Structure formats: structure tokens, C-alpha cells
Image: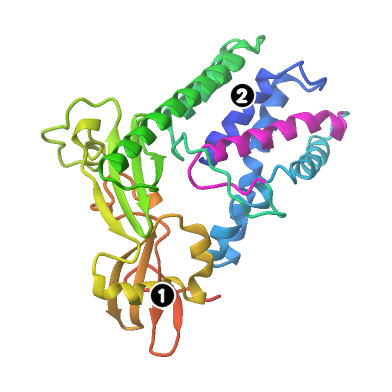
Amino acid sequence: MDTLTHAISGAVLGRATSGLDGSPLSPRRRMAVGFIAAAFPDIDFALRPFVDPITFLGLHRGPTHSIILLPLWALLLAWIFSRVYRDPHRPRDYLPLAAMGIAIHIAGDVITAYGTMIFAPFSDYKAAIPTTFIIDPWFTGILLLGVIGSWLWRASRLPAALSLLVLVGYVGFQGVQLHAALQVGERYALEEGMEGARVSALPQPLSPFNWQVVVESEKDYWIAAVNLRAREAPADPGDGRIAQLMASYRPVDDLRWRSFHAFGPVPEKRPLAREAWYSEEMADYRSFAQLPHAFRVEQTDVGTCVWFRDLRFSPGDPETSRRAPFRYGACHDGEEWRLFGHGDPPQPIDR
């Protein structure tokens, strides 16, 4: 989830819990501390200029998002707050709120599809209960109403508490939609006789009814973009990017299932794509990408390149999506594979 939404969630939580944790902090101070504490785990973005992009993918949502290390981070923040504010409050007065701010950040990331290493540094397991898209205006809006209500009714923590209660209900509603989207995939797998296929559903932008349903068997994927509430597809979506994206999510009874092979659409090029994918240079990207797809094999100035994307991050119809992030390639110069970032020309990634 975006850092600003995380921070706002901490501010609302700070106001909603005023007087409940034994802390003598004022409501205003609690909102400020909660805001900063809930933004803190994304401090790992500071590593970005100092490591290559693939390494950063492995570090982001790692130790600073760990429930194992949460007490350590909370103690650090509590000590910093007590020094920065230079008031009679002691670190322990800030500790409960600092811990709650970090915890609500972790929870906000776990409900997205990216994956969060909640047990770092002892495990690289990435927890994900994908109910919510990484940028959700409805999610953020509910929290903002809590902030506005807290400003209008400053003597009461009720607006903030109601905001969090509504937010929990909204995420629960998204969970119901996730279940419905999974049923769409399971029904398709059953109709097509794909016994043992793995079915997943990924939240999509702009609406809690928009989902990308994935049926996976071996190295083949069947993907459909669905709007669970739509009754008919728009006849003319228009030329705008948002309108075209929304039009790609079709009614349950009128889906367009697209098939993708992990190693690309051309059988003759798949052995090369497979070799590139399992090369040592792609090891870290292999641990990140859950739905890898070799979308292009081409001859460039740096050799033969195989470009991969993670279909989790191709919103709408992956067939027409051209702006997916996290696209990387392995290029062979005749002697060895090298890692490159997708671009024109390809940008080498020095490791």
C-alpha cells in the first residue's frame, strides 16, 4: 500500500485509541506519532539508491516489515520521539503507539498481492492475503473521513474509531469479492477439465469489483479480467486510458480468457527463454516473480535478450498491458548471461 495511506492509518489509529493504552500523550500528539510510526516501515526505500533494482525487490517489505523485529523498531521510534519532542514524556509513553503504528502498516501491506516478509530475518516467506489493490481510493478515503471527523469533533475519538470500523468492514467486503473471483476461476478450470490447476485472484485498480483471475497449470496460465458486478461490457469504452482499463474488466458471463506460457508464445524460442530464466543472473528475480512470463525475445546490441514480466502486475488484460513494472531480462552475449532492465536501449544491471 502507498506510504501516505499507511501514515494516515496510523494517525487515525492514534486518535481512535486515545486513553486506551495508558499513554498520557495528547490526541494531537498521538495523531502525529501514529502518522510517523505507520510510515516508518517504508524507510527501506532509502536503500534504493544504493542497491540494484533486483536486490531491492528482495529487500523491500523485509526486516522493517517484520513482526519479529516489530518490538525493536517500536523501541527505537519511542526513544527518538522522546528526544525529538524534548518534553517530560518518557520513551515508554510513546512505545504502545509506535508499536501499533508499525503493526497497522504491516497489516495494510499483507492484504495486498506483493507479499510481505513478516518473519524476516529468519524466513523469506511472503505473506499475502490479496484483498486490496496497492492504491485503493476507497480505502484511503475512509481513513481521510476519520481524519476530517477528528478535526471537526476534536474532543471525541468516535470519528476515528468509526473510520477504522468501516475500514475493517470494507476489507471484509473485499474478502467476499476475492472468494467470488476465485469461484470464477475454479468454475473455468472445471469446465476445461484442468484437474489440479491452481487458481488465484488478484485485486485490481479503481473498483473492489475488479479482479484478475488466474488459472495456472504447469507453465501455462489462463487469465481473465472480471468485474463481478457488471452485467454487460461497455460498447464504446472511449479513448482515455482509465476508460479503456475499466472496459477490460468484463461481466462474469462474458469473459475473455487469455492463455500465456511462462516461456513465451513461440514454442521454438521457449528453450532459450527457459535457459535464461534458470540462469544464475535471474535467481533473485525468480524468487520474486510468481507469474513469470517471457513476453519478448529479441536480438539487441548486447546480444540475444529474453524479457520477463510478472503477470501479477499487468492490470486489466495482460495481452494489451504495456506498462507493467518489474520487467527484467537476461541477455546472452555468446559467452554468459547478464541481467538487464527493460528499456531502449537495454540498461545493464551491475551486481
Residue at figure coordinates x 53%, y 34% from the top left: 5
Separation of marks 2 and 1 at Cα, in angstroms: 47 Å
Q: Depth check: give the residue in front, 290 or 107.
A: 290
Considering only vertical position in the picture, is 135 above or below 295? above
Q: x%, y% of residue 142? A: 49, 22
- For residue 266, side relative to residue 197 (left or right): left
Residue at figure coordinates x 45%, y 79% from the top left: 338
Number of residues whose C-alpha sits closer than 10 Å to that of mark 1, classed few (under 14), some (14–19) or many (20 or more): many
In which quarter of the view is residue 292 placed?
Answer: bottom left
Of the two numbered discs 2 and 1 on the same chain, state the one appearing first in sequence. Answer: 2
- Quadrant in which the C terminus is drawn: bottom right
- For residue 259, side relative to residue 35 (left or right): left
In which quarter of the view is residue 36 placed?
Answer: top right
Residue at figure coordinates x 26%, y 40% from the top left: 191
Point out which mark residue 276 bears.
1
Point out which mark residue 27 bears.
none
Q: x%, y% of residue 40? A: 66, 43
Residue at figure coordinates x 49%, y 26% from the top left: 171
Residue 315 seen in render: yes
Magenta extent = 89-118
